[in-house]
Amino acid sequence: MGLALFTKLPNVLTLGSLYLIRYYLKSEEEALNFNLTEQQEMFQREVRKFAEAETTPLVDIMDRENTFPQEIRPKLAAMNLYGIPWEQKYGGAGSDYVSLTIALVELAKVIAPLSMHVQCQHTVGDRFNKLGTEEQKQRFMVPICEGKMVGCFCFTEPDTGSHPKMIKTTAVEDGDSYVLNGTKRFVTNGRFADVAFIFAKLEGDISLFLVDTNTKGFSRGPKMDKLGLRGTELCDLIMDDVRIPRENLMGGKGGKFDALKDAMTLGKLCLSAHCIGLMQAALDEAIKYSMTRMHFDEPIFDLQAIHWLLAEMASRLEASRWLTYRAAFLKDQGLDTIKDMAITKLFVTQTAVDVCRFGMQVHGAYGISKEYKIERIFRDAKMYELLEGTSEIQRELIVKRLPR
């Protein structure tokens, strides 16, 4: 995919409201011209078909029961959705970050928390790919990509929030081992992960450790009952004198604050992709509802007030889509994307809340009913403003990198 991706789209922000609505009634392939490669377009169709057929039945399980359906893991693996950018020799698909973005968008359109699960597997795989030994890559990346092993990524703590340099989890060298103590919070996949990447203070600096979750002294807190993205099974992970072998120190002692920032750039791209899926789902639901909801023998779709809401949704979605795919393109070029990812995450996650709120407004009072998808979509959207660093943290990251 080249820069032509961003030069051939119509300037939807200047089009009239009614045209925008008609524009989005077309299929996505007709409405959008991101100039994807033939392979990427085929992949998009395959993931969309898979998501609609295989993951739609999981919505109630994940959202209402707040449980992760383990039976979906082999199916995700069969679609190569656990290691899209990684080399095939490590179990990956040998593709790129644009393709990862495509997959997450399509999954999130149906069920965002499942897309979050897939993202976390990529975050873990990314650390193995960049810091792991050849033996670790074969031992862990391959089964993760095959859906036989689940990983989790742990840096947030109860008292540190978004300030990773203040983490209190400690690692102490003891002979041929390291002993870890501390608590990690808001860990996605935490309730059923097989391995965990733990950021801890070692000799005053941040280091990264690989921990087998079956190790003595390792325990899990209760599953968190939360607003949205339910079924991801967030929990605390507690380490009480957890002893791990020396080789589980990833990439040597210290200096892993940069590794954390690198991992979070990937996370921000993925979260933005989820939001694109949610916004598209909100727009689809709003259009469908407005065309069937009658007012004085006419569908409310014909009302100017509804036109304006749908047009706002369409235009803001389109701007967000541009920004997200541009961020994926930049990451594929191997560029420093810390500022770009912060801008993308800030804009897209805030926009997602607005777009989904507009979708709820189209539904009127029915928008608060769990019988309609927009209620769940809105709850999920709000979560993204708070994950991988709040909007306030993104603003600080952006300002620090502005030219002076």
Image: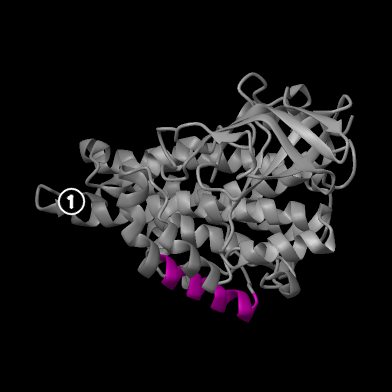
Quarter of the rendering occupied by the C terminus: top right
Q: Residue at x 66, y 63 (%)?
A: 98
Secondary structure category for the residue under label 1: loop
Give the left or right position of residue 239, taking residue 232 as reference: right
Give the percent coordinates (x, y) of residue 361: 31, 38
Front-lying residue, 344 or 244: 244
Give the percent coordinates (x, y) of residue 267: 65, 46
Rendered position, 166 above or below 322: above
Q: Quadrant of residue 179?
A: top right
Question: Magenta part mainly helix, strand or loop?
Answer: helix
Look at the image and give the residue range highlighted in magenta.
37-51
Q: Residue at x 39, y 38 (%)?
A: 379
Front-lying residue, 367 or 5: 367
Rendered position, 375 above or below 116: above
Q: Quadrant of residue 229?
A: top left
Q: How many labels, in total? A: 1
Q: Residue at x 59, y 50 (%)?
A: 194
